[in-house]
Image (tube, helix red, strand yellow):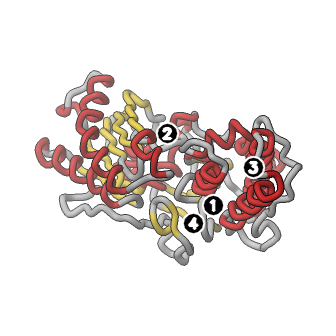
Amino acid sequence: MDGILTVLGIESSCDDSAAAVVRQAPGGRGEILASSVVGQAALHADFGGVVPEIAARAHVEVLDHLVEAALAEAGLGLDEIDALAVTAGPGLIGGVLAGVMLAKGIAAARGLPLVGVNHLAGHALTPRLTDGLEFPYLMLLVSGGHCQFLRVEGADAFSRLGGTIDDAPGEAFDKVARLLGLPQPGGPAVEAEAARGDPARFALPRPLIDRQGCDLSFSGLKTAVLRARDAMVAEHGGITRADRADLCAGFQAAVGDVLAAKAARALAQSPGMSAFAVAGGVAANAALRARLKAVAQAAGVPFMAPPLALCTDNAAMIAWAGIERLRLGQCDDMTLAARPRWPLDTSAPALIGSGKRGAKG
């Protein structure tokens, strides 16, 4: 599609409901006209994690209101929207289905083009929305359900260098938070505690750090935190606030060491990249951002990370990814299906393990 495009995006892959309106002139950067997000942390707090049935029901209750709010914020009506973009996977199937069915209803009622977007592509293409980044670039997509290094060679061309074989980093942060009695979501809680702790006190492992390739593992690191906690409980009858802070600091430092080592390896394997970019919820962690930025600087490659609001799940990235697909002449119809699994690099072998969003993409 040519000309100025104004796209309404809908996101509902996990526990954030979102709607946004993004506009782009041909060859220009994207402009976020509106972006609304409603999280569900309070709904899942008592369960220690996201409950798929509760998440799906919550999406159904708020998505239409978020669409109305986004259009109102943008000062537009549906007759001024050129297309609908919606997360069609991967994710919790009930939530994905809620968004897809709403988008289908609007598209059918208004006769608008419908574009199904891979949630991971939304994250991976965010640097083009925020900074106009040119292809190709290296992307570390790091979140609660996913972790992988990707060469982003085009809006629909992704080459995976490696990824987690078990827990994603964000999932590990959540589990460590639960082990230490911290609130969910675990990422911000562990980061806040780590700022007060001594990262060198506990000798925690750095899984796969010496193994060739770019695959990662975080399950054993989480287990090491559990054993360190249990050892202190057995010896002292509990853990102090200082103990908890030191465990958080040690855990976060270990994650940073692994990500930095694997990022350096991925960059060495990817000459000619325009930049090293990071996206996903864990990219909001300031300490981890600093580690990754230092790796990029050492390699002489520009480093890019989205604004914090665009690190976590949002619909602006979905609308933008929809624009990218529309520019390539790609569109879907009413047969668009919700997909719990949807790898970006279909030529790469499936990653082992599963996380909050099911098997890794």
> x and y percent of residue 112 in the render?
19, 45
In this view, the mark in front (2 or 1): 1
In-front residue for pair 126/210 = 210
The numbered mark, 4 or 2, whose residue comes first in the sequence reads 2
User: Which residue was labeled with disc 2?
Assistant: 129
Q: Residues at badges 1 and 3 in contact (C-beta under 8 Å)? A: no
> x and y percent of residue 297 in the render?
80, 44
Amino acid marked by disc 4: Ser
* Disc number placed over residue 93 in the picture, else none: none
In this view, the mark in front (3 or 4): 3
Taking 205 as reference, is 65 left or right?
left
Q: Residues within 10 Å of mark 4 (few under 14, many from 20)?
A: some
Q: Residues at badges 2 and 1 in contact (C-beta under 8 Å)? A: no
* Disc number placed over residue 238 in the picture, else none: 3
At a point 76% along the width and 47% down the height, the residue shown is 239
Residue 195, relative to residue 247: is it above or below?
above
Element class at badge 3:
loop
Element class at badge 4:
strand
So how many labels did they put on this image? 4
User: Which residue was labeled with disc 4?
Assistant: 159
Q: CA distance from mark 1 to mark 3?
A: 39 Å
